[in-house]
Amino acid sequence: MLPISHRGQLMPPSPIRKLVPFAEAAKRKGIKVYHLNIGQPDIETPHHVLDAVRHSDFKVLEYSHSAGNESYRRKLVEYYKSVGININYTDIIITTGGSEAILFGFMSCLDAGDEVIIPEPFYANYNGFAVAADVKVIPVTSTIESGFALPPISAIEEKITPRTKAIVICNPNNPTGYLYSREELETLKAVIKKHNLYLFADEAYREFCYSGEHFSAMKLEGVDDHIVLMDTISKRYSACGARIGAFVTKNKKLLDTAMKFAQARLSPPSFGQIAGEAALDLPADYFDATKAEYTSRRDTLVERLNAMPGVFCPNPGGAFYAMAKLPIEDSDHFCQWLLESFSYNNQTLMLAPATGFYGTEGLGKQEVRLAYVLNVEALNKAMDCLDKALKQYNEVILRPKSVMNP
Amino acid sequence: MLPISHRGQLMPPSPIRKLVPFAEAAKRKGIKVYHLNIGQPDIETPHHVLDAVRHSDFKVLEYSHSAGNESYRRKLVEYYKSVGININYTDIIITTGGSEAILFGFMSCLDAGDEVIIPEPFYANYNGFAVAADVKVIPVTSTIESGFALPPISAIEEKITPRTKAIVICNPNNPTGYLYSREELETLKAVIKKHNLYLFADEAYREFCYSGEHFSAMKLEGVDDHIVLMDTISKRYSACGARIGAFVTKNKKLLDTAMKFAQARLSPPSFGQIAGEAALDLPADYFDATKAEYTSRRDTLVERLNAMPGVFCPNPGGAFYAMAKLPIEDSDHFCQWLLESFSYNNQTLMLAPATGFYGTEGLGKQEVRLAYVLNVEALNKAMDCLDKALKQYNEVILRPKSVMNP
């Protein structure tokens, strides 16, 4: 038998995709499944962006510069300026999705056994990149009762060891939708300054803020060398398939290091770069309609959830996710049951169990993540299903416990 | 001062790109530079491939399946069948370039400190992926005198330790152009069977064989679990910018492991997959014209090189690279000098010093790699330059040694 690497064995499978076979089976039975489990927006990619690719005119589909096309990076500088972030085009490496920006950050700043602190619940794929880079994720718990605000500074500092090299923050947050305040960012600044740490800021959802203004980590003063912005066009322009992100830092030595990883993989996708560059020509009010749409979806979802007995959903300030606490004991079992054993008017819904977003074993068993990537009408139907489902689950499943857990 | 990771410091910069500033300076002086240093083919990307992207018709640029579109994988099965490789579509993960296939292989099969044996000279970026995965590259030397044939089995076995997990072979080879014979593959099969090792077969240049038939590692019988094919459309269809490759193995457990790394980065580029799928509709004789073109370039290059005093260039059987031994003592110095201090009729050429392709310190100082990615006329002009340059270099540089090396 040939050995699989230890890290390959440690590598977590996608916590969401494990439910996919159950969703497929439900569909085969003719049941309509509302997908609130995924971060794939249903908003159309702007025509202008797709047209730029369709009208591209070249003879050879060449490698680009390893840091991405200079024209694109120069134009990105203008975009960042428009949101109050002042950088030079040489501070940017275009990456293959935000994913690669995260990997470059882990690889360039942390060695095997080093630690990165991340408020939990967090984007599950951070685990994957941590395993790939052989670094340890140290979760610091934020709670649904506080709306998933930044844990107190003492809780963060408690986790710091000599192996701690960085803190990761996703703002607005996936999976909680929490929008960190300027004060919270300033708190983090104090921590990274005091303990000489990097702050990796995943701002994939920057343009999706509904309550309050986004305050980028790049705006923190006097800590330029500490900050790495990990960005992506995936959600911003509904362009997930372009696989275009960015690794941005004013730390020259760090950028030079990340650049070596970028050179090894040659270049980011060329078509995606054309799409990304074209997106920067969208009118300034482009996000207004999108934001209005997401705001109304959020309002619908949160209101419907909180109206259900025993359900609590804090109002998310950004992104397109909400976390809800349900009157259940095992979110993995419940989400599977929704697909396997439940339907209402021949419909059901797919949710992401929150357990996959927590680093601490045992947390998230009463919580689920809901992505509001469907229109209000579909959301309402999905909420009708959830309402019925919770009643039925608690009657049928929870009562005869001895039958369920023989 | 914030620390850069040890692996980030170890990460080798691109051995080719370090000469780029000298090439740019030469161009600013008005000197024409013939680029024989890079693996970017000048052959046009087939219209049909670019048109498929241009005519793509969808509303949302979505994530694809993490393993790539099923339609593309199913069609790839037919392509592989046409070259004698029998696989199922579930044996394939579409990757972001061949680069990612290599990284997935290293990550899934090797742990920190494990060793991978690679005949040197080898594709320099293997070093980068090895550093990223924290594994050791153990070179086993092939020599220009033998035309870079596979080193004897005894030399390979000498390098095997309990930490050895895999052998990498690039066939046809970058940088040597060497085409491994069926017998050499059978030799490798005996080694991997006896020592329970993986064989990673990088077959990026499969379609570029001029002397003899390509024998894929996937055709080796009775060692299915040992073989990983690392593939890419970059060179095959002059589609480097698509960033589409493939990780192929019949080892189910290994594929499931690599799939977890694939899920973490979500999906390969969508536009590139459209290009890759369209390429599979090209007529069966598509490669004939390309092969005829490369054969004539190779013949020109090899003949011109061997006609120069003190130069030896073995005839490469495949890919579009040749390695030449020059009458010089320091290929890095010579390649820089060509750009910095030499011109003939206001022209010069850029070559890749072979030192970057060897893992053993000190090897390759008399060798350079030439990529024949220019047409015959340009190649002839470049060879005129090299001929003059070697004469001048040896007169001007080598004679007054005390002046050069104070």
Image (cartoon, coloured by chain):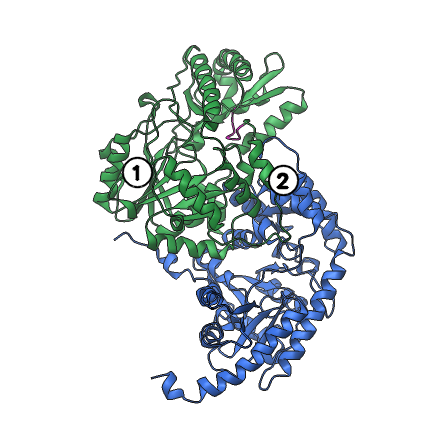
Chain colours: A blue, B green
For residue A183, which numbered disc appears in the image? none
- In this rendering, is residue B214 above or below A181? above
Three-letter code for the amino acid on which mark 1 is drawn: Lys
Report in which chain the residue with disc 1 lies. B
The quadrant of the rendering that contains the C terminus of chain A is bottom left
Element on which disc 1 rests: helix
For residue B219, which numbered disc appears in the image? 1
Element on which disc 2 rests: helix
Three-letter code for the amino acid on which mark 2 is drawn: Arg
Give the x, y percent position of residue B221.
25, 41
Q: Which comes before the other along the chain, label 1 or label 2?
A: 2
Mark in front: 1 vs 2: 2
| Residue A256 showing in the rendered view | yes
Query: Toward which corner of the image does residue A5 lie, by quadrant?
Result: bottom left
Residue at (40% x, 18% y) in the render: B313
Disc 1 vs disc 2: Cβ atoms closer than 8 Å?
no
Along the line of sight, the residue nearer the viewer: A32 or B135: A32
Label 1 environment density (alpha carbons within 10 Å; few <14, some 14–19, many ≥20): some
Report the number of numbered marks.
2
